[in-house]
Image (spheres, rainbow, N blue to C red):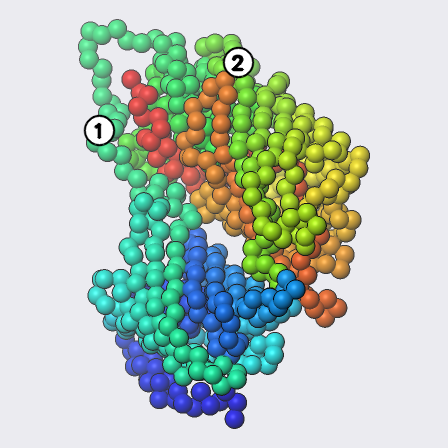
C-alpha cells in the first residue's frame, strides 16, 4: 500500500466532516470575506490548501515560511518563498521558490535536494449565484524541467458566519512519481471576532494540519499593507523512507496594495485649513484690482515655486474661447506626469484673468513639446471645490504635440524660466540568478550614476558611470556566473536627439560610446495610430564591436505593435533580432496599478524559449528635489524581474543562460522619458483627474495668494 493511500484512508473522518460542513453551508447567506492569506503551496488559501478566493486585483503578496512537503524527504534547509499578484478580477499568479537542500558533498558546489522555481495560477469561475459557494480552478507548477509540485485542482469555498469552509479535489504527481498535492482535500478556518485571529484545521490529501493565523489591520505607515503571520502543526506526516515528519512551522506574509496612490487620491478630502473660497466670492470693495498681466505674473511665479521648469505663461484664443496657455517642463514629479498636470490646471484655473474659458497646458521634455492638454476653467474650479469629476473628464482634451502652441499666443515673457543645467539620476543595477543547483541567490549590485545635460530643443548629452557595490562568490571572475559581474567605469557617453517626424511619430537617436568600449548608435521610434491609442514601435542598436556583458551583441533590432486594451493595460507583440544572434517573436502583457506596472512576457530566439515576470516601480519621492543648477533624483521606473526557460522534449533541462534571448536594452527609454512610461492617452489622463486634484492640494495649494 503506498503512502498516499494509507494516509488518505486514515483521514476519512476528517474529510467527511469537512465535506458535511460545506454541504450545510449551501443554504447559508454569505458574509463579505477579506483576503484569506497565503498557503505554503503559493496561492491564496489556508495553511496548506488553496481556497476558492484570489488576491484582490492590484495586490501583491510576499511570503516566507519553513514548511516542507514530507514526501520530498529530509533536508537540513527548509525554506519556502512566494510572490503573488492579483492580475485581474478573479485571477491570481504566484511564483514559488522552494529550497529544501543539504550541504554540497566535499569537493562539489552542487547542493543535493530540491531547489525549485515554479509558477501557480488560479481563477475564480464566474457564477450566476450569490448565496452558493465560490468555485475556483488552479494549477501548481504549470511548467518546468524539474517538476516537484505539479498539480491541478478544483476547490469550492463558502463563508458561514465566522467560519470559512473549503473543499476540493486535486490530482498531482512529482517528477519521481510521488503524490504531491493529490486527492480530496478540505479545511475550516474559524475567525475569532474582529481580532484578526483565525483557527484553522485542514487535510491536504496526504496529512492533517492545524494552526492559527493572525492578520493585522491595514497599516497606514506601510501604504495600507497588511502583515499576516501563521503557525501550523502537521499530523500523520512521514517521509518516503517511513520517518516521522510531523513538525511545527511558521509563516509570514506581507500583503501590499500596488495601486494605493489612486485609491488614496479617490478618498482624499482637503482639510478646512486649505479649503478654497467659493467661486462667486467677491473681493473687498475699494481695493486695487490686479490686471491680466499681474495675474499671469503671479501664475508664472507660482508654477516656478512648485518646481516646474521652462515655464512660460500667456493668453490666446481658439474656437472654444479665450485661453490661458502654460508651457512647462516637469522632472520633479517623476512618478507620473499627471501630478504636474494637476498643478498646472489647478493654479492656472484659480489664477486666470477674468473672462478666460480654458487652460491649455503644453508639456515639454528638453524643450520639445510632448503633449497638449486643455480643460474648462469653470469646470475645474468647481471640481477643486468638491464638484463632480464627470464635468472635468468631459471638458478635458489631450493631444500629442508635434509643434509648439499656436503663434497667436501673447506671452507674458518671451523667454521661459530657468531649467537645471545638470540632472543626476542614481539608479541601482542588479543582475542575478535565483534557485540554481549552485546558489540560492547569486547577484551583482552596482550604482549607476546617470548624468543628463540638456542642450538644444530635444537634445541632451547622456553619460553613465557604474560603481560596483557587492556581489556573491559565484559571480567572482572565473566562477560559474562571472558574466553577471558589473564592471567599474564610464559605461556610456552619448549625444541624444529626439524629435517629431511629421504629426504622428516621435523618434530618438543616440550616438557615442556604449558598454564601456563600443562605439555605436541606438535609436527608437513610436508611430501613433490615427484615431487610436495604439502605437507601432521600432528599436535598434548597432556597434562597431561586440560589447561584453549580459546584453552584448554587435547588432540588435526589435519591432512591435502595442495595442491598448484599456488605459492601464496593453498587449504588445512583435519580433526581435536578439543580441545573442537568435531571432524570434516576443509578446508582452502589461498592467498598471497606480505607478507600478506588472509585465508578463514570452520571448523565443531560435530554439530557446523564455517566459518571465517583471515589476517596474519608481525609486524617487512623488515630489522630488527642487530644481537647481544640479538636481538629483532616483529612476522614474526601476524594472526588476525573473525569467525561466520553457523546457521541451528536445530541451528538458531548465538551463541558466544569462545572455540568451534578452530583450533589446537601450541606455535611455523613449517610452519612459517622453511618453510617461506608456501612459499617454486622453482616456488615461481623464481617469486620473482625482489624483490631479489631490496633487494640487498636496503640492500647490500654498502658492495661491
**Which of the 4 quarters of the picture holds residue 251?**
bottom left
Element class at badge 1:
helix
How many numbered discs sit on the rendered protein?
A: 2
- The residue labelled by disc 1 is 273
Q: Position of residue 180 (x, y in %)?
A: 52, 77
State the residue at coordinates (68%, 25%).
495
Residue at point 27% right, 38% down? Answer: 269
Q: Measure the alpha-carbon separation of dots 2 and 1.
A: 40 Å
Q: Secondary structure at mark 2?
A: loop
Q: Which residue is mark 2?
A: 408
Instruction: Name the residue: 55% across, 69% down.
Output: 102
Q: Residues within 10 Å of mark 2 (few under 14, many from 20)?
A: few
Residue 369 as seen in the image, left or right of residue 388: right
Residue at the far front in the pictured view: 106
Residue at the far bottom in the pictured view = 1
Residue 290: x %, y % from top left: 31, 9
- Camera-nearest residue between 3 and 459: 3
**Residue at left offset 78%, top offset 49%:** 581
Q: Is residue 44 visible from the viewing direction of this image?
A: no
Amino acid at each position: 500500500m503506498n503512502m498516499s493511500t494509507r494516509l488518505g484512508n486514515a483521514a476519512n473522518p476528517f474529510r467527511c466532516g469537512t465535506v458535511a460542513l460545506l454541504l450545510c453551508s449551501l443554504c447559508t447567506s454569505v458574509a463579505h470575506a477579506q483576503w484569506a492569506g497565503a498557503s505554503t503551496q503559493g496561492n491564496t488559501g489556508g495553511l496548506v490548501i488553496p481556497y476558492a478566493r484570489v488576491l484582490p486585483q492590484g495586490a501583491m503578496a510576499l511570503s516566507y515560511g519553513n514548511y516542507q512537503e514530507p514526501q520530498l524527504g529530509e533536508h537540513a534547509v527548509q525554506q519556502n518563498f512566494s510572490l503573488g499578484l492579483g492580475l485581474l478580477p478573479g485571477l491570481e499568479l504566484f511564483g514559488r521558490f522552494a529550497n529544501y537542500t543539504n550541504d554540497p558533498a566535499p569537493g562539489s558546489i552542487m547542493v543535493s535536494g530540491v531547489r525549485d522555481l515554479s509558477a501557480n495560477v488560479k481563477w475564480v469561475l464566474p457564477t450566476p449565484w450569490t448565496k452558493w459557494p465560490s468555485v475556483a480552478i488552479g494549477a501548481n507548477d504549470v511548467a518546468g524541467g524539474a517538476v516537484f509540485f505539479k498539480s491541478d485542482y478544483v476547490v469550492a469555498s463558502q463563508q458561514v458566519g465566522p467560519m470559512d469552509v473549503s473543499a476540493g479535489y486535486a490530482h498531482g504527481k512529482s517528477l519521481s512519481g510521488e503524490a504531491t498535492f493529490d486527492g480530496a482535500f478540505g479545511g475550516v478556518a474559524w475567525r475569532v471576532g474582529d481580532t484578526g485571529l483565525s483557527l484553522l484545521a485542514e487535510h491536504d490529501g496526504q496529512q492533517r494540519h492545524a494552526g492559527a493565523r493572525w492578520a493585522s489591520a491595514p497599516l497606514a505607515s506601510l501604504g495600507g499593507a497588511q502583515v499576516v503571520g501563521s503557525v501550523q502543526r502537521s499530523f500523520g506526516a512521514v517521509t518516503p523512507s517511513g520517518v516521522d515528519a510531523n513538525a511545527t512551522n511558521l509563516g509570514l506574509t506581507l500583503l501590499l496594495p500596488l495601486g494605493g496612490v489612486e485609491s488614496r487620491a479617490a478618498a482624499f478630502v482637503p482639510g478646512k485649513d486649505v479649503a478654497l473660497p467659493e467661486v462667486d466670492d467677491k473681493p473687498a470693495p475699494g481695493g486695487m484690482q490686479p490686471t491680466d498681466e499681474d495675474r499671469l505674473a503671479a501664475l508664472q511665479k507660482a508654477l516656478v515655486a512648485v518646481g516646474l521648469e521652462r515655464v512660460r505663461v500667456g493668453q490666446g484664443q481658439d474656437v472654444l474661447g479665450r485661453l490661458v496657455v502654460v508651457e512647462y517642463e516637469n522632472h520633479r514629479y517623476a512618478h507620473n506626469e499627471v501630478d504636474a498636470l494637476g498643478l498646472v490646471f489647478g493654479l492656472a484655473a484659480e489664477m486666470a484673468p477674468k473672462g478666460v474659458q480654458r487652460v491649455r497646458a503644453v508639456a515639454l521634455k528638453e524643450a520639445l513639446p510632448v503633449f497638449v492638454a486643455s480643460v474648462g476653467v469653470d469646470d475645474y474650479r468647481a471640481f477643486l471645490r468638491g464638484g463632480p469629476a464627470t464635468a472635468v473628464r468631459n471638458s478635458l482634451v489631450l493631444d500629442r504635440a508635434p509643434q509648439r502652441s499656436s503663434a497667436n499666443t501673447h506671452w507674458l515673457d518671451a523667454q521661459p524660466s530657468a531649467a537645471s543645467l545638470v540632472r543626476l539620476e542614481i539608479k541601482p543595477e542588479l543582475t542575478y540568478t535565483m534557485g540554481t543547483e549552485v546558489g540560492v541567490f547569486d547577484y551583482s549590485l552596482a550604482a549607476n550614476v546617470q548624468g543628463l545635460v540638456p542642450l538644444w530643443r530635444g537634445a541632451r548629452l547622456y553619460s553613465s558611470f557604474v560603481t560596483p557595490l557587492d556581489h556573491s562568490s559565484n559571480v567572482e571572475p572565473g566562477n560559474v556566473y562571472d558574466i553577471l559581474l558589473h564592471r567599474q567605469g564610464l559605461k556610456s557617453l552619448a549625444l541624444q536627439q529626439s524629435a517629431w517626424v511629421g504629426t504622428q511619430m516621435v523618434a530618438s537617436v543616440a550616438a557615442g560610446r556604449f558598454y564601456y568600449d563600443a562605439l555605436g548608435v541606438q535609436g527608437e521610434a513610436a508611430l501613433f495610430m490615427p484615431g487610436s491609442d495604439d502605437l507601432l514601435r521600432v528599436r535598434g542598436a548597432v556597434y562597431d564591436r561586440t560589447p561584453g556583458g549580459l546584453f552584448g551583441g554587435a547588432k540588435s533590432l526589435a519591432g512591435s505593435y502595442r495595442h491598448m486594451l484599456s488605459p492601464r493595460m496593453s498587449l504588445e507583440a512583435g519580433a526581435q533580432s536578439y543580441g545573442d544572434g537568435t531571432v524570434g517573436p516576443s509578446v508582452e502583457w502589461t498592467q498598471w496599478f497606480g505607478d507600478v506596472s506588472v509585465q508578463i512576457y514570452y520571448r523565443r530566439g531560435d530554439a530557446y524559449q523564455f517566459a518571465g515576470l517583471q515589476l517596474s516601480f519608481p525609486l524617487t519621492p512623488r515630489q522630488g528635489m527642487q530644481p537647481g543648477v544640479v538636481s538629483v533624483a532616483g529612476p522614474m521606473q526601476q524594472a526588476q524581474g525573473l525569467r525561466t526557460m520553457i523546457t521541451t522534449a528536445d530541451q528538458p533541462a531548465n538551463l541558466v543562460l544569462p545572455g540568451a534571448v534578452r530583450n533589446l536594452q537601450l541606455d535611455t527609454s523613449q517610452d519612459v522619458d517622453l511618453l510617461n512610461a506608456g501612459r499617454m492617452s486622453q482616456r488615461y489622463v481623464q481617469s486620473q483627474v482625482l489624483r490631479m486634484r489631490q496633487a494640487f492640494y498636496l503640492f500647490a495649494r500654498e502658492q495661491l495668494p
